[in-house]
Image (cartoon, grey):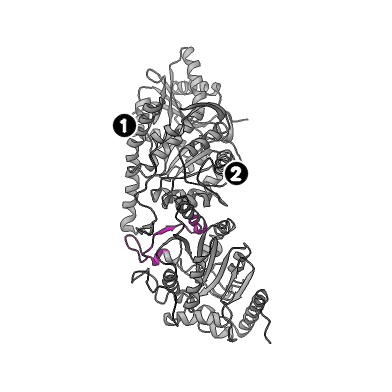
């Protein structure tokens, strides 16, 4: 039977990875990912988890180790943040290109300089195009549920791609929250044992990752792109089955009071919960506001997001990362492109929020919501604005 | 001499190496001694090309091509996966060049052997970044021309002593070997395969393209490197027990240098200086091995 727990989210995430019966974990410590891998090494050391824990000498080696392990057919996990993610990103491309179903938890953190150990989404955006599936959690329950989902999707023979579950560093990773943790029997029902069709095996020798001449490189990228596209169906199917089994349903885009909303806020990650509180307060005040939260970052849920926002007149799109001197932030750029493709022209503003751990409050959301309506009335040019900047 | 190793080759005939490629010779011999219960990690190096582009491969063993600096780490991951599955029989090896070993991959190699990962790391050493066009590495010897030590800026730093760096990690087995001494090479590979933990083989593999030598003297040059004490053959067990496998007959280093275009700019006094450096290194090795100094 699933049990109710009150636990730090990082510890619960590690428990979920252990319940998924992972074979190999390779990790290097970086704040704020540390509690996840510390707890896993403890579970291995005390015999609760029968796995190899490799305390490598860098994140670059962590991902390299994971590639070796997954290529040899083991269920493989790692976790990182920020600078470590940047360091391993070279190998993240290789993991995806070789179609290895590694699962990684990223405790999202800002990138230096200046040094910041606190949360934003710069690391997630830096690795946006590695070709991994990327999901985003808003609370502890979602983190652990998305871990099971990640292994299930990654290893599906129709997918075979690595998966990242993003959780906001500290703001989420270090919270103590009430959660429901599945038991082993329930996890086993949802997540079948990993049986790779292709692996490094002396009985059936194969070569992985040789030189791709110009005659084949494009085709290999097309195959990867098609695989990521095709993973959508498996991702939603696996969420549906999770919901049918355990009662918690997940979707690529989660909506909150959007049906009749004139203004819709678009968020990703843990700020979504604050945004919901703001929506409730504004609704109570008679303002027509809703919220669309992006749960699936890659493959990008274009259709679902368009469906969620197309009835609104004004959109306030939050980005927790800055595309310095670009047109707008990365989430907003995706949305704008998708709207253009469909000849939809709602008024929208892009707000850059919560960089390097800065709080994003209920009041902030109300100001952004009112701000986009006011800017639309004024006919202000659409662009991006960094909020909460000190004078 | 009868070699106590199978004569079965695990390379198909045909590869994409240059004529006289020492790295290709090294691979052929090493695979004979390893056998086919082997998984190979191949970080970027000449062999990334030599093995052949998709969909071809000259190697008959399972192989994963990987990024430059991943040799130590990726092999650790493969080993861990096999251990979890209870496969103790398959030998995991890394096959890397000098750039991937001495330079960019040194951290991952050091990390892997510090953890005493159960694998064999082979470094075939052609003393520069040959695949990218003969740029200097920390394995390039004192005195050499490369495309990044051109003209009068020939390399004036010593070659990094990679085996001693590995010995300092107190790994179970570290050895040098040469394509010109196949019996010694095969014996060392077989010995390494029988030992648990991290093992390191440093194989001298001449490069006619980069060294500016005719391809037909590739093996001869490798033999001269040993005979002149430039590349002594020795092995070190558990970071302590040194054994010198070949006692040279005192050939002068200039005999080796004058055959190679990469050294043609060196003066007599440069060569005398290099001779003194080689003798100093050799005496240091003799002391470590507990062999009395001659003369």
Q: Is residue B282 above or below residue A224?
A: below
What x and y, as percent, mark residue B63? 40, 60
What x and y, as percent, mark residue B290? 67, 76
Looking at the rendered structure, whether the residues under marks 2 and 1 are on a common chain is answered as yes
Which secondary structure, mark 2? Answer: loop
Cβ atoms under marks 2 and 1 closer than 8 Å: no
Image quadrant where one finds the N terminus of chain B = bottom left
Which range is magenta?
B48-75
- A145 to the left or right of A109: left
**For residue A113, which numbered disc appears in the image?**
2
Q: Residues within 10 Å of mark 2 (few under 14, many from 20)?
A: few
State the residue position of label 1: A342
Task: Locate residue B19: give its quadrant.
Answer: bottom left
| Residue A116 seen in the figure | yes
Which secondary structure, mark 1? Answer: loop
Q: CA distance from mark 2 to mark 1?
A: 39 Å
Reply yes or no: does residue B74 show up in magenta. Answer: yes
What x and y, as percent, mark residue B75? 48, 57
Reply yes or no: does residue B227 show up in magenta. Answer: no
Q: Nearer the viewer, residue B93 or A372?
A: B93
Q: Residue at x 49, y 49 (%)?
A: A63
**For residue A216, which numbered disc appears in the image?**
none
Image quadrant where one finds the C terminus of chain B = bottom right
Q: How many marks?
A: 2
Q: Residues within 10 Å of mark 1 (few under 14, many from 20)?
A: few
Q: Nearer the viewer, residue A236 or B238?
A: B238
- A340 to the left or right of B78: left
Chain on which label 2 sits: A
Chain on which label 1 sits: A
Q: Of discs 2 and 1, which sits in the foreground?
A: 2
What x and y, as percent, mark residue A231? 34, 39
| Residue A383 seen in the figure | no
């Amino acid at each position: 039977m699933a049990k109710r727990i009150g636990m730090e989210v990082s510890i619960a995430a590690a428990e979920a990875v252990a319940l998924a019966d992972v074979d190999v974990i390779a990790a290097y410590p970086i704040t704020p990912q540390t509690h996840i891998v510390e707890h896993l090494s403890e579970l291995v050391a005390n015999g609760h988890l029968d796995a190899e824990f490799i305390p490598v000498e860098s994140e670059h080696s962590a991902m390299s180790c994971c590639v070796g392990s997954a290529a040899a057919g083991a269920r493989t996990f790692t976790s990182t943040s920020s600078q470590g993610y940047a360091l391993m990103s070279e190998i993240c491309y290789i993991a995806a290109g070789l179609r290895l179903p590694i699962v990684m938890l990223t405790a999202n953190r800002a990138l230096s300089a200046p040094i910041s150990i606190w949360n934003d989404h710069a690391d997630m955006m830096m690795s946006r195009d590695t070709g991994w599936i990327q999901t985003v959690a808003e609370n502890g329950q979602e983190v652990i549920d998305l871990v099971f989902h990640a292994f299930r999707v990654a290893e599906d023979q129709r997918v075979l791609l690595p998966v990242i579950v993003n959780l906001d560093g500290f703001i989420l990773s270090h919270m103590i929250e009430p959660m429901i943790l599945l038991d082993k029997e329930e996890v086993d029902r949802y997540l079948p044992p990993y049986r790779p069709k292709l692996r490094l095996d002396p009985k059936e020798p194969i070569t992985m990752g040789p030189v791709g001449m110009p005659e084949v490189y494009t085709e290999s990228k097309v195959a990867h792109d098609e695989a990521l596209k095709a993973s959508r169906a498996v991702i939603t199917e696996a969420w549906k089955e999770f919901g049918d089994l355990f009662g918690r349903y997940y979707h690529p885009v989660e909506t909150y009071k959007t049906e009749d909303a004139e203004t819709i806020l678009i968020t990703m990650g843990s700020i979504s919960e604050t945004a919901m509180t703001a929506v409730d307060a504004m609704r109570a005040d008679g303002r027509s506001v809703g919220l669309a939260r992006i749960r699936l970052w890659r493959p990008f849920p274009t259709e679902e997001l368009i469906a969620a926002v197309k009835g609104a007149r004004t959109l306030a799109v939050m980005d927790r990362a800055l595309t310095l001197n670009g047109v707008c932030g990365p989430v907003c750029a995706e949305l704008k492109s998708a709207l253009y493709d469909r000849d939809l022209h709602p008024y929208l503003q892009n707000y850059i929020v919560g960089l390097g751990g800065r709080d994003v409050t209920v009041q902030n959301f109300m100001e952004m919501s009112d701000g986009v309506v006011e800017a639309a009335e004024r006919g202000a040019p659409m662009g991006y604005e960094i909020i909460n900047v000190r004078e | 001499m009868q070699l106590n190793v199978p004569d079965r080759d695990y390379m198909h005939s045909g590869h994409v190496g240059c004529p006289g490629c020492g790295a290709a010779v090294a691979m052929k011999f090493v695979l004979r001694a390893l056998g086919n219960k082997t998984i190979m990690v191949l970080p970027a190096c000449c062999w990334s090309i030599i093995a052949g582009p998709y969909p071809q491969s000259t190697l008959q063993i399972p192989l994963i091509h990987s990024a430059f600096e991943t040799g130590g780490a990726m092999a650790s991951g493969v080993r861990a996966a096999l251990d979890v599955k209870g496969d103790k029989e398959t030998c995991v090896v890394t096959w890397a060049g000098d750039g991937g070993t001495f330079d960019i991959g040194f951290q991952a190699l050091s990390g892997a052997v510090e953890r005493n990962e159960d694998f064999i790391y082979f470094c075939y050493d052609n003393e520069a970044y040959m695949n990218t066009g003969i740029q200097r590495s920390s394995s390039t010897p004192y005195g050499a021309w490369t495309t990044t030590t051109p003209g009068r800026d020939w390399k004036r730093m010593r070659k990094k002593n990679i085996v001693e760096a590995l010995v300092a990690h107190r790994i179970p087995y570290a050895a040098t070997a040469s394509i010109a001494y196949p019996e010694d090479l095969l014996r060392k590979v077989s010995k390494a395969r029988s030992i648990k933990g991290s093992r390191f083989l440093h194989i001298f593999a001449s490069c006619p393209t980069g060294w500016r030598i005719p391809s037909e003297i590739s093996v001869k040059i490798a033999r001269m490197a040993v005979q002149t004490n430039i590349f002594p053959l020795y092995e070190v067990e558990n970071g302590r027990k040194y054994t010198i496998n070949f006692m040279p007959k005192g050939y002068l280093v200039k005999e080796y240098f004058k055959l190679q275009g990469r050294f043609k700019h060196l003066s007599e006094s440069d060569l005398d200086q290099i001779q003194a450096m080689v003798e100093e290194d050799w005496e240091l090795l003799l002391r470590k091995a507990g062999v009395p100094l001659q003369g």
